Image (cartoon, grey):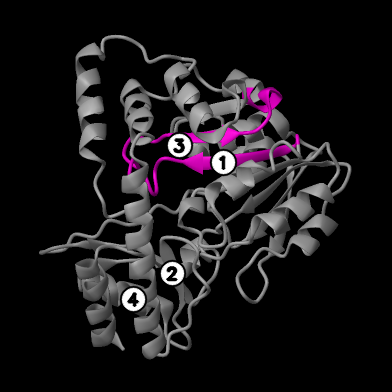
Amino acid sequence: MTGLEFNARLRDIPVYPAAATYSFDGELVKLASNETPFPPHPQVLEAVEAHLRTLNRYPDPERTVLRRRLSERTGVPAGRIAIGNGSCELLLAAAEAMLEPGAELVYAWPSFSIYPHLAAMSGARALIVPLNDAGEHDLEAMAREVTAATRIVIVCNPNNPSATALPPAAIDAFVAGLPRHVAVIVDEAYVEFSSLQDPDESIALLDRHPNLILLRTFSKVYGLCGLRVGYALGSEEFRLAVDRVRQPFSVNALAQAAATEALNHVDELERRVEQTAIERMHLESELQERGLETTDSQANFSWVSVGERDEDAVVGGLAERGVIVRAGKALGQEGWMRVTYGTRHENDRFLAALDQLL
């Protein structure tokens, strides 16, 4: 023991439930972290390699080129675009900038595992609203929790881990009904996979709602998990606030170069989305045939009920057979598992392992 003293809030901050990595003597099928099975586009790798020789210099603290390219792509002025070390950094910075003791935060549960950190680290009060029976956000119940003390409401759409999504019209009506002092953060990490909307549809809501912030990431469909780049589309006021509370140079030079180049390959993006939709249909129909219930997935993963079976035995049994999925217990709902779509070969390995267990 060192005798060091830490602040009282540290006890309340949960440990982020990262996927376990199992030692397996053979080919390991990783379906636990919602990564895409596709490697970065070759020209993205070239852009990264081109920057290797300048790593003795700091990255651009303003993320100028990437913000300009995102502005061209989305139509949102560059001054209203914040870039983060993954969208997680932007969520944590929003909490740092907006929450404090006496303030309130509203979100649904189960949802993205970083949300409980926001109230715990800031001393704010979290009001947590259960998902409905279909695994969707209950927006009416969330709106009822909003008070004069509410600073942030988060809607994860599509939701992680339940894979469900709401159409932009529902988000539009929800934000319109809330007071303007409330920042509504719509976390759209998986929006490209949703069949309920074109990604541009929710961007159109920004001009109607100055208190709306959309969070997006290059980790999922763009396949840049290892470099950590996310972005927020919102007001300039929000961007300036989150930039003020973060460390400088938080988005490294290679990440900025990769994300900027990735935006040039829309055709590759569309191919990945189409391939993911094919695997979604394949996996969900196969699970249905085995009598396993899933929610209506609009993401690159399925939320699967294990029914009366022991969740630990199913998840552990899959791991013993070289297939890693995420246990529902770690994500806020026991009796379920979250299964990311891999390649057809990987998905069939999962199904074969499942058949041995069932």
Which image quadrant: the C terminus?
A: bottom left
Q: Which residues are magenta?
A: 210-239
Given the current orientation, which residue lies at the most extreme top position?
Answer: 57
Q: Left or right? Give the position of 52 relative to 148.
A: left
Residue labelled with disc 2: 302
At 74% across and 51% down in the image, what residue appears?
172
Which residue is label 3 attached to?
Answer: 86
* Residue 220 among those drawn in magenta: yes
Answer with mark 3 or mark 2, whichever residue precedes in sequence.
3
Mark 1 = which residue? Answer: 215
Q: Amino acid at mark 1?
A: Leu
Q: CA distance from mark 3 to mark 2?
A: 23 Å
Q: Quadrant of residue 54?
A: top left
On the picture, is 140 further left or further right than 33?
Answer: right
**In the shown orientation, is residue 344 left or right of residue 287?**
left
Number of numbered discs visible in the structure rendering = 4
For the point 47% across and 36% down, which residue is it? 230
| Residue 290: % across, % down | 36, 89
User: Mark 4 — residue?
Assistant: 282
C-alpha distance separating marks 4 and 3 = 30 Å
Please determine whether, in this image, residue 8 is positioned above or below residue 172: above
Q: Which mark is residue 67?
A: none
Counting residues from the start of the chain, the first of labels 4 and 3 encountered is 3
